[in-house]
Image (cartoon, helix red, strand yellow):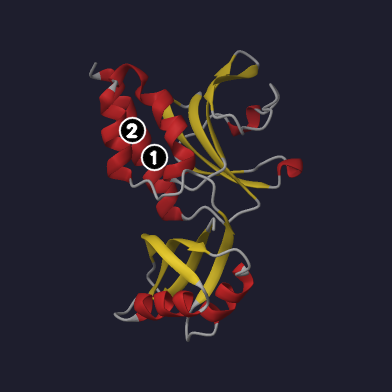
Amino acid sequence: MSLVPYLLRVELPDVPGSLGAVATAIGEAGGDIDAIEIVEHRPDGTAVDDVLLEAAPGVMPDSIVSACNRLDGVRVLWVSRYGAGGTLFLDLEAVEALTEDPATALDKLVDLSPATFRSDWAARLALVGDGVKVVHSTSATPDIADGQTDWFPLGKAGRLEAPGEWDAVIAAAQVESERDIIVVGRRGGPEILDSEIARLQHLTALAVSIAGAR
């Protein structure tokens, strides 16, 4: 019997016992948790966690979502099938991978971004003359037109406006200049949080340093 992997993004009270209650609810609804990552601690006393879980065929994700939403202060922000390798790829693992071959650190960061940020695609883009050049990208990256110059210059990491036909949320961080950026995108959502933007900028800066130290 092949289990079905799902990624659940959940908002919950940032107090002891909340995550345990969520885990219990998921288990009772037919889900088996593989990994949990804290995405963000918020000033209002809540937290956002990503939960990678598996469910047996026939277990509907709606039942797991409903079980979580019945808990006080808990709200499921997003649930989807998870196809990024079947694991949560932590930032430390990403840094270790980048140092294996410093010469390819920036390309490697692009390749790792879908797993690291639970995104659908990632690309490194450069503004060259009057157009945009795709320096390196993952296979699921949408066609990026030369006219997509309104993303430049990028002074600091942040969310970008995606073309409407993409149905995507995207964010970017500056690489080596305002004309050189790494972009990550999710189709449909969930929203890219401030903490994720900060992580993207941090990992990009580390990749630049690693590449420069070769």
Identity, as a three-letter code, of the amino acid under mark 1: Gln
Q: Which mark is residue 205?
A: 2
Q: CB under 8 Å between callouts 1 and 2?
A: yes
The local crowd at label 2, few if under 14, some if 14 to 19, many if 20 or more residues have their Cα within 10 Å, is: some
Q: Which element is circle 2 on? A: helix
Q: Residue at x 45, y 38 (%)?
A: 113
Coordinates of residue 13 in the picture (x, y in percent) = 40, 78
Q: How many marks?
A: 2
Q: Quadrant of residue 65?
A: bottom right
Q: Residue furthest left?
A: 213
Q: Residue at x 49, y 69 (%)?
A: 31
Q: Residue furthest right?
A: 165
Residue placed under numbered mark 1 in the picture: 201
Identity, as a three-letter code, of the amino acid under mark 2: Ala
Q: Which element is circle 1 on? A: helix
Report the Cα–Cα distance between label 1 and label 2: 6 Å
Q: Relative to 117, does residue 213 appear above or below in the rendering?
A: above
